Image (cartoon, grey):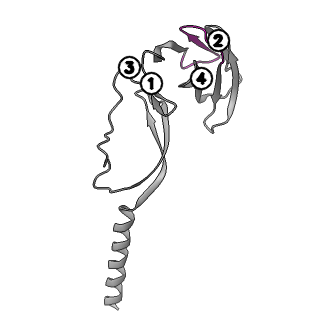
Amino acid sequence: MKKITLTCIAVAGIFAAYAQTSQRCGIYYDYDATGNRVKRYYDCKLFDPANPYPDGITNQQPQAGARMAGGSNEDASSTDASSIVVYPNPTHDALHIKFSEAAPHTHFHLYDGKGGIVQAGNISGQEYSCNLGALAPGLYHLHILYKGKPHSFKVTKL
């Protein structure tokens, strides 16, 4: 009986070791220094817990001025992160969005924590205000398409 138990434990150990170094497929995200999700990609690779960064990737913050959006690196001078200002954050009622210059075909989506769109609209001009007074307090995600490039902001409603 002890032989069977030891054999079962050994087989379970082999399967556990294989599962830890198996191929892991999934959706992975990259974040900027403020915690905004800037890149989403699907990847299948061999995962080894002893070497969590096999490609030399480390958990470092992006360099100053670097901004990734839409899955590709962009030149910081073409769309600077400071070209959009969202204030006040946190807010009670009104949320203001200010652009460095007006651009055609600019629109926004405001998502709740479940991923549902709670507000959306087109923006014309350099400034826009949206009323968040009717929304429940919590964390919202503001996605703006400005000059053909996506920008994301976290907004806290008090």
| Within-10-Å neighbours for mark 2: few <14, some 14–19, many 20+ | some
Residue 157's quadrant in the figure?
Answer: top right
Q: Position of residue 15 (x, y in %)?
A: 38, 72
What residue is shown with label 1? 74
Q: Do the residues labelled 3 and 1 touch (CB within 8 Å)?
A: no
* Element on which disc 1 rests: loop
Q: Is 10 positioned to the left or the right of 44 in the image?
A: left
> Residue at the location (59% across, 25% down)?
142
What's the amino acid at mark 3? Gly
Q: Position of residue 107 (x, y in %)?
A: 65, 21
What's the amino acid at mark 1? Glu
| Within-10-Å neighbours for mark 4: few <14, some 14–19, many 20+ | many
Q: In this view, does 50 lie above or below 146?
A: below
Q: In this view, does 52 lie above or below 96?
A: below
| Nearest to N terminus: mark 1 or mark 2 | 1
- Magenta residues (range): 89-105
Q: Which numbered mark, 2 or 3, is in the foreground of this view?
A: 3
> Residue at the location (34% across, 73% down)?
14
Magenta: main secondary structure equals loop
On-image quarter of the N terminus = bottom left
What residue is shown with label 4? 144
What residue is shown with label 3? 65
